[in-house]
Amino acid sequence: MKLTPDQQAMLDGEKGWPLQIAMQMLTAVGAALDAPDMIPVTSTHLVIDGTALGEAGRDFLERLVEEGGRFAVPASINAIAVDRTKADMTAEEHDQIRMLEACEKMGALPSCSCNPFIQGILPTFGEHVAWSESATAPFVNSVLGARTNREGATAVASALTGLAPRCGMHLDENRRGEILLKVETEISGVDRFSLLGALAGRLAGDRIPVLDGISTPPGIDEYVAFGAAFAIHGASAMFHIAGITPEAPDADTAFGGLAPAEEFIIDEAAIAAEHAATANGTAGPVDVVSIGCPHASLDQLRDAAALLADGRASGDVTFYIHTNRSTWDAADAEGIIDALTGAGVSVTADNCAVVSYDRVPSGTRLATNSAKMALFARSVSDAEILFGTTADCIAAGITGHWSGRQK
Ligand code: F3S
């Protein structure tokens, strides 16, 4: 890769170990992906989930601090594995807090959310950024028109240097649509956008799909639900919605004038089949309700409180709504947290039912409106999934029984 003298000095260790290790990471990735040089980035989003990084991650981040590492660009933090306000933490949970504190010492914003968009962290059109967490990249690229690859540990290296290899989604030619998904059924609500995202992600694989036929622009909660499911079921970092997303004023433009490599029709039968594949549970008792994957917005918390206004969670159900601390605080100021906790709901901040040291136990019957939570809970907790609308999930939380649209 062609490096500037300043970048070469970082790589040679003349500017300290943190910048040297960061440049080693970035040049290794850049060389593997044939990047000609580095591109400046304006922000980063970091995954420091302690259940994944463990003691090695803690030691690495703390060594960066000890050796003088400081972030060169704004860095937000993804969901972590424990609520920061929890009393009596375990040793592992303390380690997670140490990782967060290390990042804060280097200049990170402790946003602790897989949905930083609802906290107002929104890169603008054309900005080059380096964002980790698979679900954020499709939103950044597709909805905002900013540019990021699906970063991993390299996001920390980009935070330290303010650089990323010039490759992948940073380049115009890699942002064109590749396959066409003709949507021939009405899609609205987070549950149906989540199912559509899961299906689109799987059909796309590592290709960029153009969805044609969505007439009503999704709201931010629907986009986030779609993007999270899209990312977990596929490897692509971008989608287009013809006539709606910023780089797709129409399908032809999204394809850059080229023909799609493949076409699929998504009709009601395809959505129903996706629902059936997502939900492996049968009607009956519910152990856990999990709403807020990705983290719930203030509107979603308000809606949940309204749906629970005349009800109360069954004593047999652990009823979670997951959000981040700043949204929790805003909801608290409106009295929504009191209303929800008074109705027996646990409104978690910073973490969720599976990104946690305290995951739902194996075999849990878990009701959710999120295809991402469904896949995660099945994978990491061998959960039995009951999938439906937010209202279905809340009804199940109140009655302790699943009677939603379970197939
Ligand atoms: Fe967020 Fe947990 Fe879902 S971290 S995206 S709520 S699995």
Image (tube, rainbow, N blue to C red):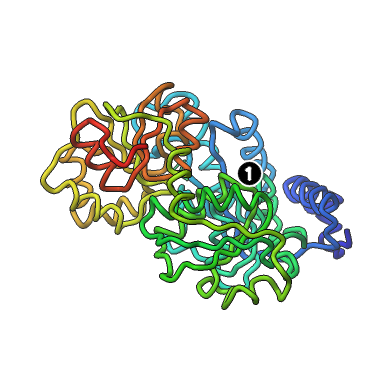
List x then y, in percent, for residue 222: 41, 58
* Left or right, 116 with reference to 339: right
* Left or right, 69 with reference to 278: right
| Near-viewer residue (351 or 289) | 289
* Left or right, 107 with reference to 118: right
- Which residue corresponds to the image point at 24% horizontal and 42% vertical from the top-left? 394
Q: Count neighbours of disc 1 (C-alpha within 10 A) and say few if under 14, some if 14 to 19, many if 20 or more.
A: some
| Near-viewer residue (206 or 23) | 206
Figure check: 334 above or below 255: above
**Residue 238 sits in which quadrant?**
bottom right
- Which residue corresponds to the image point at 74% horizontal and 59% vertical from the top-left? 168
Respond yes or no on whether mark 1 lies under 8 Å from ligand 1. Answer: no
- Which residue corresponds to the image point at 68% horizontal and 51% vertical from the top-left? 206
**Residue that badge 1 annotates:** 65
Quadrant location, the N terminus: bottom right
Figure check: 225 above or below 128: above
- Which residue corresponds to the image point at 89% horizontal and 62% vertical from the top-left? 2
Q: So how many labels did they put on this image?
A: 1
Q: Amino acid at mark 1?
A: Val
Quadrant location, the C terminus: top left
List x then y, in percent, for residue 406: 34, 37
List x then y, in percent, for residue 256: 70, 74
List x then y, in percent, for residue 111: 46, 52
| Near-viewer residue (249 or 313) | 249
Q: Mark yes or no: residue 282 visible.
A: yes
Q: Mark yes or no: residue 14 visible.
A: no
* Left or right, 248 with reference to 30: left
